[in-house]
Amino acid sequence: MRINIKESRWRRREFLELGATTTAMAAFGGIGQADRAAETVEQGAKPVFRTSLCDLLGIEYPIIQAGMSGVAGPELVAEVSNAGGLGVLTGALTPPAELREKIRRIRKLTERPFGVNLLLHFDLRPPKDPALIPDEFVAKIQAQLNRFRERLGIAKSASRPGAIPDLANAAFEVVLEERVPVWSIGLGNPTPEMVRRCRERGIKVIAMAATVDDAKSVAVSGVDAIVAQGGEAGGHRSTWVKRESRERANIGGMALIPQIVDAVRAPVIAAGGITDGRGIAAALALGASGALIGTRFIATRESGAPDFYKQALLKADSDATTVTDKFTGMYARVLRNDFTEEYESSGAPTFPPFFQFLAMGDIVRATTEKGSGEYFPMYAGQGVGSLRDLPRAADVVQSLVREAREVITGLHHRVKSA
C-alpha cells in the first residue's frame, strides 16, 4: 500500500517533544523554537523526547533494544525498559517452559512494557528434514568444520546435523498466554490470524523488513509498526527466504528508511548502524518514528554476550564487519575472524538455514570455553567502530536521548548560520 505525497510530507513532520513542544524538523524553521526548548530543559523541567511510537508502545523514549540471541536476557531487557526504552527478550529456539520463565523474570524486574522476539523463517515452521540434505554436501561441509575442530581439540564429525527443534508455534502461544506487551518478529511475516490473536490480547506487533517489498508484505498482515533494517545492521538479514547472494536485501539505511516510510502507513522504526543520538536524529529526519538498536546494547554490562565478544566490539574499527552465511546458513553481519575468513576462502558450502547453526554448535561451545572469539559468531553492525566503553544499558538509553536532543537543537543554529 502506497501513501500519497501529501501524507508522506505530513509524516515527515512527526510530532516530537523536546522539553517544550517542538518538532524534529523545527531545526530547519520556526525561529526560536529549539532555543526555547533548550531553555525549558535548563530551567529544570523534566525533559521529554517522544514520538507517536512512544504512545503506541507505552514507552518514554522511541528507543528499542534489539532482541538478540545469546545477548538479550531478562536483565538487559528490564534495564532498558526501566530506563524508558523498550527492552526485547530473545525467544528464538527457546523451549516454551524456559521462555515463560524468562518472561516472568522480566516482570519481577520491571513494571514497564517489554517485548519478546521470535523468528518466523519458513525453515522453522515446520522445520525441514535433515535427511533431505545431499550426502556430498554433508561431506564437504564437515570436512571444513573438522579443520576448526582439530585446532580446538574436539572430536571430528562426518554426520549430518540433527533435527531442528519445532518450537516456533509453541513459543507464540506462550507470548499470547503471558500477554507480552509487544511481540517482535524477525526473519518472517506473521499471518493476519496471528496478528488478530495478538490484538485480542492487547499485544502490539512489530515486524522487521530489509526490503520495501517485504515491508509491504508485513504491512498487509496488519502489524502495528515496521522495522526498516538497513544493510549496516548487525545480525541476520531479516528475510524469510534466503536470498541468492549477500548483496541482496542489503540496502543502506539512508536509502531504505525513507522508501519504506513512503510505502507503508504503519510507523517505521529505523535499524542499522545506529549507536548514538546522531543516528536517532537522522532516522527521525528520514521519516522514522524511532530507532531499534543492537550493537550498542551488546557492549553493556547487562548484555549476555561473553566478555571476549564485548571486548572485540570495543577494539573493532569501522571496517571490521562482513556479511556471511557460514555461521547459521543465513546471511548475517558479523565481526570478521579466523572462522569467517578461512571458511569463505575455502569455497566450502553451508548447510541450509539453521542446520549450519546446529552442525557447528560444538565449535561455538569449545571456542567459548577457551575465551576466544576466533570461531565464535560475533554479530555486529557497521557502527561498531564508535564503541569505546562498556556502560550500563540504562546509561546508554539516557545518552542516546541526550545526544539526540542536542543534535536536533543544534541543527537550528547550524542551518541559520549556513
Image: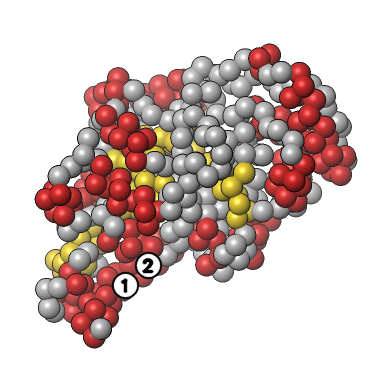
Q: Is residue 63 above or below residue 101?
A: below
Q: Give the residue number, with chain letter if any, for mark 1.
A: 407
Around disc 2, counting alpha carbons within 10 Å, would you say few (fewer than 14), some (14 to 19), or many (20 or more)? some
Q: Amino acid at mark 1?
A: Val
Q: Please identify the quarter of the rendering in which residue 45 is found.
A: bottom left
Element under disc 1: helix
Coordinates of residue 72 in the picture (x, y in percent): 51, 45
Coordinates of residue 74 in the picture (x, y in percent): 48, 43
Q: How many marks?
A: 2
Toward the viewer: 72 or 109?
72
- Residue 212: in sight, yes or no? yes
On the rendered image, what quadrant is the N terminus found in?
top left
- Residue 57: in sight, yes or no? no
Q: Give the residue number, with chain letter if any, for mark 2.
A: 278
Around disc 1, counting alpha carbons within 10 Å, would you say few (fewer than 14), some (14 to 19), or many (20 or more)? some
Coordinates of residue 193 in the picture (x, y in percent): 30, 20
Q: Amino acid at mark 2?
A: Arg
Toward the viewer: 166 or 306?
166
Toward the viewer: 276 or 301?
276
Q: Name which residue lies at 34% across and 23% down.
A: 191
